[in-house]
Image (spheres, rainbow, N blue to C red):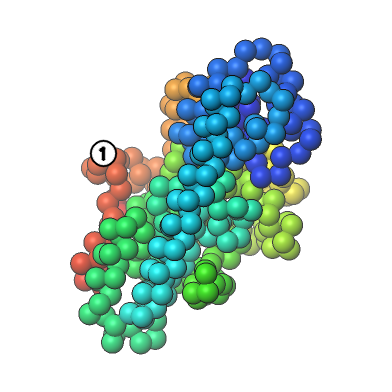
Amino acid sequence: MTREDCLLCLCARQEFLPEHRQVVEDLCRGGAVRWDRLAAAAERQGVLPIVGANLRQCDAGLPEELAARCELAVLENAAVRERDADRLAAGLARLLEVELEAMLLKGTALTLAVYAEPWVVTSQDIDLVLRPGPGWEKGKGEEKKVRWALYSNGVECDLETHHDVTMNGVLPVDFPRIWREARPVRFRGVPVWMMSPEDLLISLAVNCCRKRFRLKGLFDVAETLQRGEKIGEAIDWLRLGALAREGHCEGIVYAALVAAREALGAGLPAGSLEALGVSRVRAGLLRSLLTAFLSAAPFTGRAGRPLALALAYASLRPAEAWRSFRYSLTHPPRHRREDPHAPAQAVVAGP
């Protein structure tokens, strides 16, 4: 890793300990830091608020203008997250009015369960998966309008599935089972659902693969592992392994966990990786690709991008890798969303 990549990995954490601060200061004293490159990468990787907040605690020679930029990033992101939370709470209430129940996904769920403060990382959208409630038929006429209004405001709310979790139909995700094992929570007083700890971690690993092991995705995995231990929601690793294999994503979870451990120091209990059932040959390939990826400039430069792509495809089973590749050839870079105006039974089309 470059010096800047090392600094990003040290500062991309909520529990910034004295030993992390000491290593940061030693790195900064050991040679010149390309601060502009570090800041640009942190912003691109979605972690500028938390990285900036931690850097400002260090005697690292942070340029004054960059310190101000980091402080502004926290304030701006806090304002955006507050606006998004208000918008989401209103949207959830409106969905209930038309008899649709919602489950929080990815960063939206982590805001409740993992992030100490909502501003720690940046996000481009809000993700929900919906299912009809008991009286859904009577609200059906307004359902499309409500969902379209949410989509128009950056809330991706697919019905009975979600394109991010299935990787646009590549993975066979059992959403009925996920709903059965979900737990009810409240978001600003509005009833909503959240995945089980195992399903949430799997969905975060899938997101890492989709985003080519972006630092924010690794941060989410690492912090979810640490937070779960603190609040008594430790992962059932045997259960997680079984679910990952059922969803044909055991390699994806393996790659994301090892990447979070190697890059950010995420703690993995003994036997957790073995529970995934990844063969020795495949695990060795994934570790080799990950080592090469992290040995480059994985977050600040371009050298790691081909390796990240290779790692993402290697983490898929052959059939899913082919489907993903075929989908990438036949669809534009931006995913194809579900059309809220389509018939209710329609879902995001797979490749």
Q: Amino acid at mark 1?
A: Leu
- Residue 343, position as x, y percentages in the image: 21, 71
Asked whether the viewer can see residue 339, the reply is: yes
Q: Count the marks: how many?
A: 1
Asked whether the viewer can see residue 261, the reply is: no
- Residue 314, position as x, y percentages in the image: 48, 37
As helix, strand or loop, the secondary structure at mark 1 comes to: helix
Q: Look at 53% across and 60% down and name the residue there.
A: 109
Q: Look at 52% across and 28% down and name the residue there.
A: 39
Picture quarter containing residue 184? Answer: bottom right
Q: Is residue 236 above or below residue 80?
A: below
In the image: residue 296, left or right of residue 334: right
Q: Look at 61% across and 60% down and name the residue there.
A: 113
In the image: residue 286, left or right of residue 275: left
In the image: residue 79, left or right of residue 9: left
Residue at the top extreme of this rendering: 31
Q: Which quadrant of the rendered structure holds the N terminus? A: top right
Q: Is residue 85 above or below residue 250?
A: below
Name the one closer to the observer, 295 or 214. 214
Name the one closer to the observer, 338 or 99. 99
Q: Is residue 120 above or below residue 152?
A: above
Name the one closer to the observer, 143 or 51. 51
- Residue 223, position as x, y percentages in the image: 64, 48
- Residue 25, position as x, y percentages in the image: 72, 23
Picture quarter containing residue 259? Answer: top right
Name the one closer to the observer, 55 or 221. 55
Graded by Cα atoms within 10 Å as few (under 14), some (14 to 19) or many (20 or more), the crowding at tag 1 reads: few
The residue tagged 1 is 329
Q: Look at 32% across and 57% down and name the residue there.
A: 153
